[in-house]
């Protein structure tokens, strides 16, 4: 009797999993609908191309250590292009701020909130003033922390909100 019960549970789970998967996508080895929705959301952003940055885990780690040291004032801020800056800021924020939350209240609900900051942009999509990036990113972090208080923060997705020849706004 126990075998039949266990087998029926396995069958029920298999049916549930199969019903949640589009068989044609599975057979064609295409991304799931959730991934398609995420890709469509990214493409709707006006500057989604800056979120495309291919880097090895080792390079990301080395760059992130250097970036964290620069944010904390232990070294000069490196000169970064938009793609690098975006990846490093998002990774730093999610790892150093969101993932390190210790005291938070999950019962407090809040609307999705967009925080922004702007820096000067130089030639060839380079951040013109790395120190301005550090200062404005630090102020951005403080604004988020002040606004969110002890609310539970979810991992964030930084992106380019606006871009001009002279400035760029991150959100």
Image: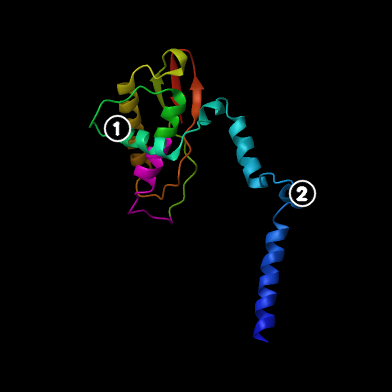
Q: Are marks 1 and 2 in contact (CB under 8 Å)?
A: no
Residue 105 as seen in the image, left or right of residue 163 = left
Relative image position of residue 56 (x, y in whole percent)? 46, 37
Q: Is residue 97 magenta?
A: yes
Q: Pointer 1: residues within 10 angstroms few (<14), some, or many (20+)?
A: many
- The residue lying furthest to the bottom in this view is 1
State the separation of the CA atoms marked 1 and 2: 47 Å
**Secondary-structure class at tag 2:** helix
In the image, what residue occupies the spot 64% across and 84% down? 2
Left or right: where 16 falls relative to 121: right
Q: Is residue 95 above or below residue 23?
A: above
- Of tags 1 and 2, which is closer to the observer? 2
The x and y percentages for residue 165 are 47, 12
**In what element is the residue under mark 1?**
helix
Q: Earlier in the sequence, mark 1 or mark 2?
A: 2
First to last magenta residue range:
90-107
Which residue is label 2 attached to? 24
Report the residue at 69% width, 44% height from top: 30
Identify the image quadrant of the N terminus. bottom right
Q: Which residue does the numbered mark 1 point to in the structure image?
A: 71
The quarter of the picture where residue 128 lies is top left
**What number of labels is visible?**
2
**Which image quadrant is residue 46 in?**
top right
Name the spot of residue 78 as percent of width and height, x first: 33, 24
Colour treatment of the image: rainbow
What residue occupies the far left of the structure in this picture? 74
Q: Is residue 74 above or below residue 24?
A: above
Q: Nearer the viewer, residue 139 or 49?
A: 49
Residue at 56%, 28% (x, y): give it.
Answer: 48
């Amino acid at each position: 009797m126990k075998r039949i019960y266990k087998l029926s549970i396995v069958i029920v789970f298999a049916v549930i999993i199969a019903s949640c998967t589009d068989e044609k996508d599975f057979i064609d080895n295409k991304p799931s609908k959730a991934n398609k929705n995420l890709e469509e959301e990214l493409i709707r952003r006006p500057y989604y191309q800056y979120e495309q940055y291919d880097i090895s885990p080792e390079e990301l780690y080395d760059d992130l250590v250097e970036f964290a040291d620069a944010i904390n004032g232990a070294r000069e801020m490196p000169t970064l292009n938009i793609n690098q800056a975006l990846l490093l800021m998002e990774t730093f924020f999610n790892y150093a701020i969101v993932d390190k939350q210790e005291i938070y209240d999950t019962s407090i609900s809040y609307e999705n909130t967009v925080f922004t900051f702007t820096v000067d942009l130089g030639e060839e999509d380079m951040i013109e003033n790395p120190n301005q990036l550090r200062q404005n990113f630090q102020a951005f972090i403080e604004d988020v922390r002040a606004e969110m208080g002890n609310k539970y923060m979810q991992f964030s997705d930084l992106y380019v909100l606006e871009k001009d020849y002279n400035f760029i706004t991150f959100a």
